[in-house]
Amino acid sequence: MDCDVLTLAGIWNSGPSHWQTHWEKRNPAWKRVAHRDWNNPERHEWVDELDAAIAMSEGPPILVAHSLSCVLVAHWARSESALSISGAFLVAPADAEAASFPSEAVGFAPMQLHKLPFPSIVVASANDPYVSIERARAFAQAWGSRFVEIGDAGHINGDSGYGDWPEGERLLGELCRQVSA
């Protein structure tokens, strides 16, 4: 894939069986955005870390986000950063307003439901414990994102059987071609 990519893991980071980790191994130029405290993320700090990582990119990157980091992308888009990105691939967005939202994450509610100023794809599961399919669809609509439902896929992570996940990589390739055209 010929796009600059920054990967954004969710709360607790993405472990060795996660699709993000697999994709990074195959694409060594891709960089995972570091976070000071994966177990207790604070929105303002994480938005600043993301902005710094975008500033270090050679060009406007595509953000490949999972779970809580999808919410991070929506907050970053509203942060008035002078920087830009090419697009966002948003997988299994967590619902910061749901009862299932991890209490360790601070400052992510309310959900940012403004149109994103870049192309994006939201990929969601019908049985994700951190977001209902209806809410995921509503996020995609509010963000102006293409919406892709992949059926009963849990949280679309390694624990749900999504290690290598070639279908997701194909969708990301479509976004990459779209923003490169």
Image: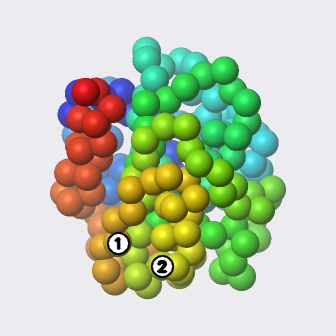
Helix, strand or loop at label 2? It is helix
Identified by mark 1, the residue type is: Glu
Front one among 171 and 9: 171
Residue position for label 2: 133
Query: Which of these two is toward me, 101 or 112?
Result: 112
Q: Percent from the top left, x then y, of residue 1?
A: 21, 34
Q: Is residue 127 left or right of residue 22?
A: right
Residue 118 place in picture, x, y as percent: 49, 37
Colouring used for the render: rainbow
Which amino acid is tagged 2?
Ile
Residue plotted at (43% across, 30% down): 86
Q: Which residue is mark 1?
A: 149
Secondary element under disc 1, as helix, strand or loop, is strand
Front in this rendered view, residue 172 or 49: 172
Q: Residue at x 69, y 55 (%)?
A: 112
Residue 159 sits above or below residue 37 on the image: below
Measured along the vertical axis of the image, is residue 33 above or below residue 180? below
The residue carrying pointer 2 sits among few (fewer than 14), some (14 to 19) or many (20 or more) residues within 10 Å by Cα, namely: some
Earlier residue among tags 2 and 1: 2
* Mark 2 and mark 1 residues within 8 Å of each other at the beta carbon: yes
